[in-house]
Image (tube, helix red, strand yellow):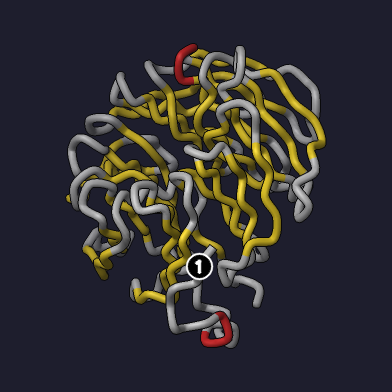
Amino acid sequence: MLLRAALFWGALAGSAQADLAVITSQAAGRLTFLQTADGSLLREVDLPGQPAAIAVSAAHVAVIAVGSRTLHLLDPAGREVARHVFSGAPFALAFDGQSGDLLVTDAIGAGAVHRLSVPDLKPLGQMSAAANPTGIDSDAVGWFVVAARDADLALIYPPGCRSCSPRSVSVGHHPFGVTLHEGRAYVSNVLSDDLSVIDLQSGTEIARIPTGARPYATTFSGGRGFVSNQYDASLTVFDAAGLKVIGEIETADYPEGLSTDSEGRVVVAAWFSDLVQIFDPNTLQMISESPVAEGPRAFGRFITLNPAP
């Protein structure tokens, strides 16, 4: 694993406001570390095996390289801490908000979710899923939700689950990305062009929000939700309280990964344009645009707030 940039972690450690975005470039086999305040480059790290999905915490960066079926755990400076190779088909991951464990979806057999300890990546349990589990997210309480793409289901797991079976909720067609926010799960339905809103406690779908073509990921800022629309080169903007669409933002071609920093800035990875764009959530105007290595995906929560040195 090769560190490419001349700027090192010490340049960032003194500023609590210097949120860090880590962008996976699947085609290039590289991670790009950017400062979200202005999109400036901090460093690049080679990571072979088609890195796509990502999850970050204050202390770690976790990446799934889908080509090599490998989970890589790094520190915020890009140095590898541990790795774990799967026998199945791992895809997406999230840090459990309660325990700090890593949760990884896997298309092996009928579908599964793996739980691994951090930082040693020791397997702690495996939970059943459904056909082709893709996106996953967890909240601070420890709930986690998985999108089962080929079953048109969202799977809800209670806090602390290591071997339990999930509650299944029917959603739109081809669910993919999942974001948990204030007691709800937001599931992007790629082929029905809408967003399912699920109440975690009751396990019911309470709304469907129309989006642009091929919605992928969701994030929140300042009482608004933002959904990346791959085929429309746009973000759908909706009111998080009323769950009604209130606007749209034009983006570069094929926006995918989407996350928010501690100042509320909305950060987008545009896969076909090899760009990362940062938007003001109030004016809906672009703040900065940064070129990155070929094929940025950044699928997951890719921004660490107040990262550890």
Q: Give the quadrant of the N terminus.
A: bottom right
Q: Residues within 10 Å of mark 1 (few under 14, many from 20)?
A: few
Residue depicted at x 24% and y 66%: 289
Q: Quadrant of the C terminus?
A: bottom right
Residue at image location 56% in from the left, 67% down from the top: 78
Q: Residue at x 56, y 35 (%)?
A: 136
Q: Is residue 3 left or right of residue 73?
A: left
Residue located 40% across and 30% down the image:
188
User: What residue did someone put label 1 on?
Assistant: 2
Front position in the image: 41 or 99: 41
Task: Check disc 1 and report its element: helix, strand or loop.
Answer: loop
Q: Please tell me how many numbered marks the rendered image carries.
A: 1
299 and 251: which is toward the camera? 299
Residue 114 pos. (x, y %)? 70, 32
Q: Is residue 213 left or right of residue 186?
A: left
Look at the image and tell me whether residue 218 can be seen.
yes
Amino acid type indicated by mark 1: Leu
